[in-house]
Amino acid sequence: MLGSDVRKHIYDVVIIGGGPAGLTAGIYAARAAMKVLILEGTSTTSQITMTDLIENFPGIPEGISGFDLINRFKRQALQFGAVVETGDIIKIMKKSSGAIPSWEAATPGGSYEGLSLIVATGASWRKIGVEGEERLIGKGVSYCATCDGPLYRNREVVVIGGGNAAIQEALFLTNFVKKVTVVHRRDQLRADAVLQKKAFSNSKIEFVWHAVVSRIIGSKFVEAVDIKNVETGEIRTIPTDGVFVFIGQAPNTDILKDVVKLEKDGAIITDENMQTSASGIFACGDCIRKLLRQVITACGDGATAAHSAQLYVEALKGSSYGI
Ligand code: NAP
């Protein structure tokens, strides 16, 4: 029992990240009467805010933009009493002084202390880094076929990459588009055999081997790409309506590498309760090791992380919430 020993400025939970996972965790934790701080990054925005139209979020059959959906999540978190602040975390430290174990999250503008932490820092799509890519994001350049594929009905698109994501998404795109051109830098796919087999037998998919996209062309929207053969150096231009980049994802977990256990690719390892390897730290959303990175799964993780943090803090305090 901590009783009067509980320092007033300590939050019950500090949530790092203001995307779907972090905000859902905030809604659940605040609604459970926890003292909640959500820290949004200043330099990074949730990937979802870059999605024009989300058609697969249950309950919104008319679709919604990622930006609007995030604003709704935020309004709901604030409504239940969560505090939202802005700051980029530069360090996470365990506070060992005193009887109460807690965690401190430091930003350039100040530090925040929580009896528990929920990490919801998301992931960044790896970019190919060619001319036109940044400028045409959301205007034909996409990193999410599930989100944007239906917008390309009866059109032609280029998919870049040869891993599971590229091939699975190329197959998904064939449900809508007239033609998918997969551009891969080698002559062998990295994707699982079962996916390869499906792709090779799909008449809508054409492969361009030993090739990279060296430029994305378009004024307002994508119009064409330059494809460079990496063996001969030859460049040819092909017209296209969209470019889907699937060359891997990078979880935003640099600040956590000495704090919790990570996979080789940087994804945070959690159990089914979103507990990380460090007691009192939970993680959710795209930054964790998982199969399906979608808004709906991030929300589910966020709710679970909040509940786990609540149980953890209740056990620390020796009393339950909601009174
Ligand atoms: P990945 O497996 O790392 O594959 C990335 C692909 O992009 C590779 O083919 C790679 O080429 C290519 N690539 C990397 N950098 C490139 C660059 N600069 N320019 C051009 N091409 C480049 O990544 P992923 O496909 O996103 O998958 C990530 C993880 O999620 C994997 O573990 C994957 O198995 C898993 N996943 C599984 C499923 C499924 O099981 N259905 C679906 C999606 C993802 P090289 O082959 O030459 O290296």
Image (tube, grey):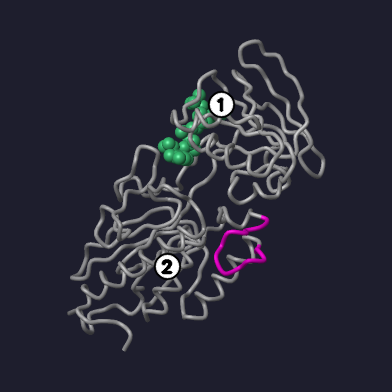
Q: Earlier in the sequence, mark 2 or mark 1?
A: 2
How busy is the neighbourhood of tag 1: few (under 14 within 10 Å), some, or many (20 plus)?
few
SS category of the residue bearing label 1: helix
Q: In which quarter of the image is residue 112?
A: bottom left
Judge from the rendering whether residue 265 lies leftward or rightward of residue 240; answer left or right.
left
Amino acid type shown at disc 2 = Ala
What residue is shown with label 1?
Answer: 200
Task: Give the quarter of the figure containing the N terminus.
Answer: bottom left
From the top left corner, tell me how far across and down residue 200 is, in percent.
56, 26
Q: Nearer the viewer, residue 126 or 43?
A: 126
Q: Is residue 209 above or below residue 170?
A: above
How busy is the neighbourhood of tag 2: few (under 14 within 10 Å), some, or many (20 plus)?
many
Judge from the rendering whether residue 20 lies leftward or rightward of residue 36; answer left or right.
right
Query: What is the distance, in whole Å, between disc 2 and disc 1 at their CAs?
Result: 42 Å
From the top left corner, tell me how far across and down residue 164 is, in percent.
48, 35
Q: Total label count?
A: 2
Q: Which residues lie in the magenta part?
A: 52-64
Q: Which residue lies furthest to the top in this view?
A: 232
Label placed on residue 21 = none
What residue is shown with label 2?
Answer: 25
Amino acid type shown at disc 1 = Phe
Task: Give the quarter of the figure containing the C terminus.
Answer: bottom left
